[in-house]
Image: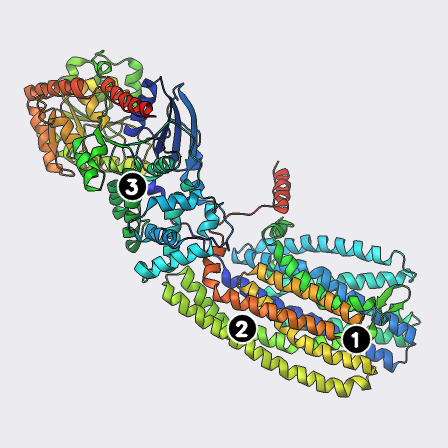
Amino acid sequence: MKICLLMEGSYPYVTGGVSTWAQMLIENLTEHQFIVFAIGAEKKYKKQFKYILPKNVLEVKEVFLDEMLSQIGRYGKRYKLSKDSVNNLKNLITGEKVNWDLIFKIFLENKIKNEMDFFMSINFFDILKDSYEEKYNTAPFTEFFWTVRSMLVPLFFLLKIKIPLSDIYHSAATGYAGILGSMAKFLYKKPYIVTEHGIYSREREEEIIKSSWAKGYFKDMWIKFFYNVCRASYEYSDKVITLFEKNRQIQIELGCPEEKMEIIPNGINVESFKENFNELDKKEENKISNELIGTEDKHMLDLMLLNKEKRTEFINIGTITRIVPIKDIKTMIQSFNIVQSEIKNSRFFIMGPKDEDEEYFDECVRLSQRLGLKNLVFTGKVDTKKYIHLMDIMVLTSVSEGQPFSILEAMAAKKPVVTTDVGGCMELLYGRNDGFGKAGIVVPVMDIEKIARAIITLAKNDKLRKIMGESGNKRVKNLYTFEKCVESYKKVYEMYLKKQ
Amino acid sequence: MAGIGFELKKLFKPTGFLSKVRAIAYSALVSLGPFILCTATIVTLIIFLNIMKIPYKERELFIATIVYVFIFSQIISSGFKMIITRYIADTLYEENYKDILPSLSGLLSIVVFISSVCAIAFYWYSPLPFYIKFTSYVLFIELIIIFIMMEYLSTVKDYIKIVKSFLSGVIASILLSFIFLKFTNLDTVFGLLLALDIGFLLIISFLTGYLKNFYGETASKKYFNFLEYFDKFPSLFFVSLFYTLGLYSHNFVFWTSNLSVKVADTYVYAPVYDVPTFYALLSIMPSMVMFVVSTETSFYEKYRNYYSLITGKGNFADIENARKDMVRVLWSEVRNLVEFQLFFTLLFLAGGYYILPRIGLAQLSIDIFNLLTLGAFMNSLILVIILLLLYFEDRSGALFVSTAFLISNVVFTYLTVNYSESVYGLGYFASTLFSVVIALIELLVYVKNINYHTFCGQPILYKEKKGIFGKLISSLSRDKNN
């Protein structure tokens, strides 16, 4: 059977939770064939896949945002639009509730041959002008025009795209990918499933509020637009899968019908996290030494990791993460500073690629130097399956998360975790009355003091670390295995395939 | 987390509206200069010929030569002039001063080649002696060079120097012709043409000196980059070409009528019709100058305000008010022009009544002159509206108007030629009336929707449009790099 997997800004261009999930799904459901429909950010990433595509991927259809925005249209056209269509297009701009049936129809009826022509048509300029007068009439009109354009043109582009025929449509987010799924459902009447790893509309909202590219008076417009877009997925999908209970509650709040919902958590291969070595080989050691930043004594890293006895003289505190603002590495570094002053034999390892946001990385390095953090190492990208076993405590200080694989991995490796209370982290560590006990300590977001306290508590209590590590391991083994995850999706797919 | 929302950015490239408008305006102004001066020279020489009692045959050959040289140099240079005006404006806006003069060399090499091919083809079977053909050819090429150079000189804006160089050339021509006719045994027509050749060569050298002085000796190698503008704005070329063709198309129709005369087995023309055309067109010169000068002061201000609100932070109400303000001034400018032109038209009609018979025009020519002068009245409006449409970047509208003018002029004149002598000139009159109505409607509708045109007609994301010429240039420059 053919499944069309709709991805946005993730697989197969970027590594991370959603991509890991997608790769795992495809790899393990060899009885199905997959069409990957990927919406990427920039054209320069075309065919730049970070993953080896499994054999059951039939094709990867790629579209890019910058490509959508750089189209050329002919202006001066006039289209026949019903009054309802006009009102719905207006609602898209002003953020009122949109009837997506009508929007899909406008673009499917083939009256509009080219979406840029439509955007630059006489009718649409009138719609734009009316929306402006209704709600934004004190804002600079040119800015309004360009904002609406960058907001709607990608949507129009996607609405005009020919979606490959498939038996099931499965999007990995609401948002633009969800619009494609909703449209496929509307057009082909095939089942449409959405797995929401985070809450797309909430994430956009946070991003827009903080952003500098959206001007104050248009932030509200952008936010409402994304809520409208996400609402389509909740409306058209047959099933909304979420990863944990907290998100399920939010989705219900956002208007997703409860009966559509199911929780399928992420899963990992617990077996592969069994401790399987003690020593680092010489090559690996050199690699780390070369990338050493933030420590004054290069020999220390050798000493601390090479041999187990030396290593255990210290408390090794690690994090496996991409060094990007959303992970709030700066807060982590400041917490480490407090920990260091109290636990003299503590050492810190930030493990993950440095090149994703180089500016932010530099800021982090400067911060640690200013604080005089001696025992902090940015290791760069490493084999997490090896390194995680060299740690005593794992930390995560993100400001936004779904259900992070790094926590699942820590639990699989029997390491206690300190994490901020975001996404599904609390549920992972404390469980939902599953009797496995606590696998770590949950702390508030950006609370430097509390994060430090939690680490210190664990650092001082050898026994507690062991207990928590075991608890986590048990929970992962029982609830978050990839076998379980794959099995659940298998069932979902089969149910819809049988129905057809 | 997944999502590409954060990649959205505002994309906007402000364009140099103002520089373009100024360019069009100055170009219109400076093209009038050589036209008037050349006219003055030729009229002086014709008076000369009358005074010196030169035989009719020779006088006729000289006038026919001048008519051909003058009309066809304008037609051939017209389209190129408009393209190069835009190229110069953009190049200056981007401050690439070193690219200016190379484009002049490049453009002249192309236009001179095309004109030479036309001239050689034209003179191939002519029985005229070679020295006459040659001096005529040189005059033809010189005029084309001057017309094109004027587009460049409009950016220098040192009008006194320009006028001085023209005056010196004109004086040299007149003195030399006097000397040649009085003191040498040169063939009359040859002598006059030679005198003009030398005088105009003097003008060209002066102008070249000014340009070199202004833009400096250092220059880039971008000789043919302006050709990209044929890909970008092909309509500009045709707007100007069709308008200029339209201006003389009624004469061409008359050259096929029974009024036509064949001179020296070479030139076919219709002096009974062509001479009044010439005087009639003179009547619109003052108002053209007036229009350019007055838009520069009042209209330009409103125009700038409107576009700066758009490129700046104006809300829609402000933009709409600025639009209304601009449109109001626009129409008041047009009204002023009409009144001003009306005055000169009446002056010319009255003046023609007294003067034309005295300089030997037949009654038929005077009747034609009256109709043509009334036509020229509307012709001035057509030209102004085409310029205004180009100010607003309505190139397709401008092309529509100039095409309508060309076609209607040919068709209506053809109808009158075959009807009767009494309606000669009515074709041009009807054509200008028809075209001015079209032009007014186009302008009216366009400025009403100008907000839409400005927002949706501009390239949404600036993207180089590459056609054959652009590809040609990039392939050439690639070769150079290798």
Spatial separation of the CA atoms under disc 1 and disc 2:
32 Å
Q: Which mark is residue A230?
A: 3
Q: Which mark is residue B275?
A: 1
Tell me the crowding category of disc 1: few under 14, some 14 to 19, or many 20 or more residues within 10 angstroms, Cα based.
Answer: some
Name the image quarter holding residue A473: top left
Q: Are marks 1 and 2 on the same chain?
A: yes
Tell me the crowding category of disc 2: few under 14, some 14 to 19, or many 20 or more residues within 10 angstroms, Cα based.
Answer: many
Query: Which dot, 1 or 2, sits closer to the camera?
Result: 1
Q: For the N terminus of chain A, which image quadrant? A: top left
Q: Which residue is mark 2?
A: B295
Q: Are marks 3 and 2 on the same chain?
A: no
Q: For the residue marked with disc 1, what is the amino acid?
A: Val
Helix, strand or loop at label 1? It is helix
Q: For the residue marked with disc 3, what is the amino acid?
A: Cys
Pinpoint the chain carrying mark 2.
Answer: B
Query: Which dot, 3 or 2, sits closer to the camera?
Result: 3
Find residue A347 and report its horizontal and vertical position in percent: 17, 25
Question: Which residue is rendered at x = 62% and y = 54% of the image?
Answer: B234
The vertical placement of B164 against B8, above or below, is below
The front one of A434 and A454 is A434
Q: Are marks 1 and 3 on the same chain?
A: no
Pinpoint the chain carrying mark 1.
Answer: B
The vertical placement of B274 against A9, above or below, is below
Helix, strand or loop at label 3? It is helix
> Does B218 sit left or right of A411 as displayed?
right
Helix, strand or loop at label 2? It is helix
